[in-house]
């Protein structure tokens, strides 16, 4: 692994981890009124495109960090849809 991969993994990790506090807050409070489903849906689509891009370029940091981000964002989208009903 070279320094460019380390920079990519560090950047991707920071962005991936940034979603966790929001997920935990929604999980604890069950409140999503102020959270935009459109924003998270668009972000999730963008993450899928980054994964495809990473696969096409065979870029490990992009594939790994965005795959984890995809899972976290899908959890958030699920919470928004599920808790909006309540």
Image: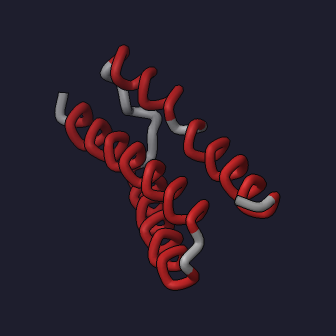
Residue 31 position in % (x across, y down): 35, 24
Residue lying at 44% horizontally and 49% vertically, measured from the top left: 68
- Colour logic: secondary structure
Residue lying at 66% horizontally and 42% vertically, measured from the top left: 14
Q: Depth check: 19 or 41 in front?
A: 19
Residue lying at 47% horizontally and 74% vertically, measured from the top left: 49
- Looking at the rendered image, the quarter that the N terminus falls into is bottom right
Q: Depth check: 41 or 46 in front?
A: 46
Residue 6 position in % (x across, y down): 74, 53
How many numbered marks does the figure carry? Answer: 0
Vertical placement of residue 39 versus 52, above or below: above
Vertical placement of residue 59 versus 18, above or below: below
Residue lying at the far bottom of the rendered structure: 56
- Looking at the rendered image, the quarter that the C terminus falls into is top left
Vertical placement of residue 30 versus 84, above or below: above
The image quadrant that residue 5 belongs to is bottom right
Tell me: 58 left or right of 2: left
Residue lying at the far front of the rendered structure: 1
Residue 21 position in % (x across, y down): 53, 26
Tell me: 48 left or right of 13: left
Residue lying at the far top of the rendered structure: 28
Tell me: 77 left or right of 20: left
Tell me: 74 left or right of 82: right
Q: Depth check: 61 or 78 in front?
A: 61
Residue lying at 54% horizontally and 53% vertically, measured from the top left: 65
């Amino acid at each position: 692994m070279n320094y460019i991969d380390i920079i990519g993994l560090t950047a991707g990790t920071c962005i991936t981890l940034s979603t966790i506090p929001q997920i935990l807050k929604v999980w604890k409070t069950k409140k999503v009124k102020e959270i935009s489903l459109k924003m998270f849906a668009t972000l999730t689509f963008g993450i899928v495109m980054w994964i495809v891009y990473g696969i096409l370029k065979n870029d490990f940091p992009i594939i790994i960090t965005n795959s984890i981000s995809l899972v976290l964002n899908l959890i958030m989208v699920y919470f928004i849809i599920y808790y909006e009903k309540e």
